[in-house]
Image (tube, rainbow, N blue to C red):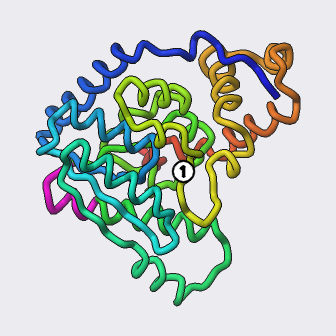
Amino acid sequence: MKIDSPDGIKINEEKITNYLVGFIRDNLNKTGFSKLVLGVSGGIDSAVSAFLAEKAIGASNVTGVILPYKTSNYENISDAGIIIDKLGFAKRVVDISPMVDAYFEAHPTDDNNRRGNKMARERMSVLYDISAELGALVIGTSNKSEIMMGYGTLFGDLACAMNPLGNLYKTQIRQLAKYLGIPENIITKPPSADLWAGQTDEGELGISYELLDTFLYYYDDCHYGDDKLIELGFTPDIIEHIKTTIAKNRFKASPTVIAELPE
């Protein structure tokens, strides 16, 4: 299926960069922190967050952490190191294999989703420990496409103190990455959380980011109903798939529900 990307999804890269750099600075100032820590995966999203963090507060105030599992793709580990070294961050490498394997030795499973969620939460656990050690806030890397589709792990990769990317679709992240000068191989590689061999984001989502973002723009930004979406060329099956996925995972994007006490 080919549906042209709408003009409205194009961004003014300079304006967005300046705004997000200000967002990072303002949030640090409000909390009294002056340092950031982030997990750098070798993918485009963490690279964009890293470049924005450097512009906001300078390399000396940012720590980049590489968090491989024993089956992680070496290319991603290498690309993560290249990003950290290019920006001049302090670099740490923490292998999460011992922690994850110890758990699943005691609680075996063949469920890749369970293993992936455990790995994502282990990575965030490490980041928050380093955050406590350094007095640094954790900066997030999840984009709007992932957040709307619930494609992330609650208290794992979705956790952070601030997220500059959460209102940018994946295809907008690619626009921003080119403007920021992120290496082309990182921009063009198939997006993957690297949770198991051969895993890709688009394979898990069941749709390309180009088509997904076009749908989400018309559905969320323009508030188009099913009839208009069908006129654009979306099939009923695609519409049902995306809307069902959004509804099923909406809880991940909601604040924790706290019980109101009776008077």
Which residue is farthest right? 236
Quadrant for the C terminus in the image? top left
Determine the residue positioned at 52% across, 71% down: 71
69 vs 132: above or below: below
Where in the figure is residue 20, as x and y percent of width and height? 31, 25
21 vs 93: above or below: above
How many numbered discs sit on the rendered protein? 1
Where in the figure is residue 114, as x and y percent of width and height? 60, 69
Pointer 1: what residue? Answer: 152
Asked whether, in this view, residue 52 is left or right of residue 5, the answer is left
Local crowd at mark 1 within 10 Å, few (<14), some, or many (≥20)? many
Which residue is farthest top? 7
Disc 1 element: loop
Range covered by the magenta-colored residues: 128-136
Which secondary structure dominates the residues rendered in magenta? helix
Determine the residue positioned at 64% across, 35% down: 209
Which residue is farthest bottom? 106
- Does the magenta-highlighted stretch encompass residue 130? yes
Determine the residue positioned at 87% across, 28% down: 235
- Does the magenta-highlighted stretch encompass residue 156? no
Q: Amino acid at mark 1?
A: Gly
Asked whether, in this view, residue 205 is left or right of residue 78, the answer is right
Where in the figure is residue 150, as x and y percent of width and height? 59, 45
Name the foreground residue: 4 vs 85. 85
Where in the figure is residue 149, as x and y percent of width and height? 62, 41
Name the foreground residue: 36 vs 83. 83
188 vs 65: above or below: above
Asked whether, in this view, residue 150 is left or right of residue 85, the answer is right
